[in-house]
Amino acid sequence: MSESRTRYDVVIAGGGHNGLTAAAYLARAGLSVAVLERLDHAGGAAVSAPAFPGLPTRLSRYSYLVSLLPEAIIADLGLDLRLASRSVASYTPVLRGGAAKGLLVERPEGPATRASFADLTGGDAEYDAWRRFYSQVSELAGIIAPTLTQPLPSASALREQADPALWRELVERPLGEAIESRFRDETVRGVVATDALIGTFARMHDPSLVQNRCFLYHLIGNGTGEWRVPVGGMGAVTDALAARAVTAGAELVTSAEVTAIRGGPGDAEADVVAGGRTRTVRARLVLANLAPWALSGLLGEERAAKPVGAQLKVNLLLSRLPRLASGADPRVAFAGTLHLGEDYPDLERAYAEAAAGQVPSRMPGEVYCHSLTDPSILGQVPDGTQTLTYFGLHLPATLFDDPATRAQRKELAVRRAIASLDEHLLDPVESVLARDADGRPCIEAKIPQDIEADLAMPGGHIFHGDLSWPWLADGAAADAPAARWGVSTARDGILLCGSGAQRGGAVSGLGGHNAAQAVLELI
């Protein structure tokens, strides 16, 4: 951003992946665009970086996987990006009757998956129920997914195309009812339920249905719900988008913090602090790639309750993969999502303990080994080295609110997370941790407060707030472009373009794409 230039067609506050998506579309359409990013690099949560001194491995430290990014956006923008499929969907180690077992779900599912279900549950009934349920969910995903890059459809328009019973189960009634009626095995129930709880602190019978919305978002990406690994790490997503935006003519300005936003359509403005100076940049429209709560503060409005994030992220580097007590091949078990402490009763118990102000005694969480799918992120390291990332559930920011006890509670949460993995291993995690250049074990952990400090996500909420249904409520007004695209705010001329947009959340580019479409209708 040159010193002399003070006006653009569009100013975007926040250089996360959604802001870059919007910039690429708008600059390609010939509009003058400035993206203003507070940090010294773009990307927000979609970044890759070395996490351990002296080691070259680049970890996806915040966002881990990609599901919702539509192939249409990748094709539209000609992104230099490859998303790799994991060879395994999930593996769930289980201790039953003193025996170490496991539930394997292949990708694609084959005879080994059916045999694994039968071995764990004692027959074919649970796998048949699993197949029926996810076949129906896939049909619904196929209906919803194409609408994500279109103006918002009405609820009734989608309901008319969907299976009425499934619509009721997923959209109108708490998800716990469907899980409990369709499945009998507590491990199978828990594996299904976890997609409803990623970054979402709720019971399966929560009347708000926030768990249902989370579940839906995790299963509709590109009509398949497959979560893929970006080759080169999450930073490859950001790099591809930034390159396309800059090539199209957008200005990307880092170390530039937006401190206030004012105005309306045709004459909006933002105050920006960069290089120790404050200046005002004007635009026809301002896009906020920020949480709605943060935007309210920049607008000088009274703010609603701050979002509350609910997760623990632990990044590790291992000298080798540990052996499992079940005898499963570690390169298979760790290739997909490894479920820990996520039997259905465990999820409910952990929620109750956290709601009562206690770190869950048995931590539910999930583990991913990205380097099995994408070895390129490792760099020059000894043979056998692998990354491991842990995402813990039911750990709301409120558990760590007190600064006097925060460090101790964080340490306790990490210990319990590691213990949830160790109980299924022949080799404790500590025995296979790599060491950095200073001889320290390669492990870093981030609670919601750390996420907020690093990325300015209010409350460390990875979705910027509770997810919304990806459609218009029947009877809702949609006469303005911003409303049609789900990116409106209370101020005309100021649009959401991040995860807080109606179809935002996760690494999808949807907030940016849909804001850009609204802008192109307005200008």
Image (cartoon, rainbow, N blue to C red):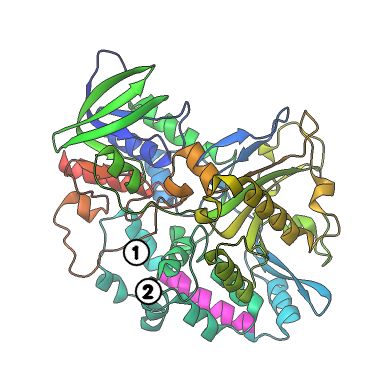
Residue 469: numbered disc: 1
In the foreground, 412 or 190: 412
Are there few (<14), some (14-19), or many (20+) residues within 10 Å of tag 1? some
Q: Which residues are magenta?
A: 126-140
Residue 464 picture location, percent across and down: 40, 50
Say what secondary structure mark 2 lies in. helix
Q: Identify residue for label 2.
A: 171
C-beta proximity under 8 Å, tags 1 and 2: yes
- Asked whether residue 210 appears in the rendered view, the answer is yes
* Front residue (pair 147, 496): 496
Depth order, front residue of 332/433 = 433
Residue 426 locus on image (x, y percent): 86, 59
**Which residue does the image show at 25% across and 73% down from the upper left?**
156
Q: Is residue 153 magenta?
A: no
Q: Quadrant of residue 423?
A: bottom right
Please state if 453 lies on the left or on the right of 143 as rendered: right
104 above or below 432? below
Reading the chain from its start, which is encountered first: label 1 or label 2?
A: 2
Identify the residue shown where x is 61% and y is 57%: 392
Secondary structure mostly seen in magenta is helix
